[in-house]
Amino acid sequence: MKNITPLARNEFICWIESAKKPETRARRIRRTREEIKEGKHRPCCWAGCPHR
């Protein structure tokens, strides 16, 4: 995760932690890894961290 900003990193973390089910969390972790490898910097289709 060296190539993304701290804000982007925190958004991915918040997106992962906002999942209620462990299966959803695991799926989001896999998707985050793939998206970062592809060079994406924000979770797709997510309104943003609710506590910002």
Image (cartoon, rainbow, N blue to C red):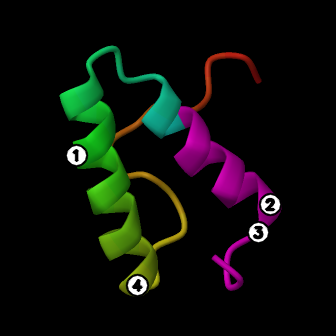
Q: Residue at x 36, y 23 (%)?
A: 19
Region in magenta? 1-14
Left or right of 4, for residue 32? left
Query: How many residues crowd around disc 1 within 10 Å: few (fewer than 14), some, or many (20 or more)?
Result: few
Where residue 14 sits in the image (x, y, percent)? 58, 34
**What's the residue at 22%, 46% (across, down)?**
27
Q: Residues within 10 Å of mark 3 (few under 14, many from 20)?
A: few
| For the residues bearing labels 3 and 2, Cβ distance under 8 angstroms | yes
Q: In the drawing, does residue 37 fall left or right of residue 26?
A: right
Residue 6: assigned label? 2
Amino acid under disc 2: Pro
Residue 11 versus residue 13: which sits nearer the camera?
13
User: Which SS type dominates the magenta stretch?
Assistant: helix
Q: Amino acid at mark 4?
A: Lys
Instruction: Write down the residue under mark 1.
Output: 27
Q: Is residue 40 placed above or below 30 in the rendered structure?
A: below
Q: Is residue 4 magenta?
A: yes
Number of the front mark, 3 or 1? 1
The answer to which of marks 4 and 1 sits earlier in the sequence is 1
- Please say if the residues under marks 2 and 1 sit with CB atoms less than 8 Å apart: no
- In the rendered structure, which amino acid carries the disc numbered 3? Thr
Pointer 3 with pointer 1, Cβ within 8 A: no
Between the residue at mark 2 and the residue at mark 1, the CA separation in whole angstroms equals 22 Å
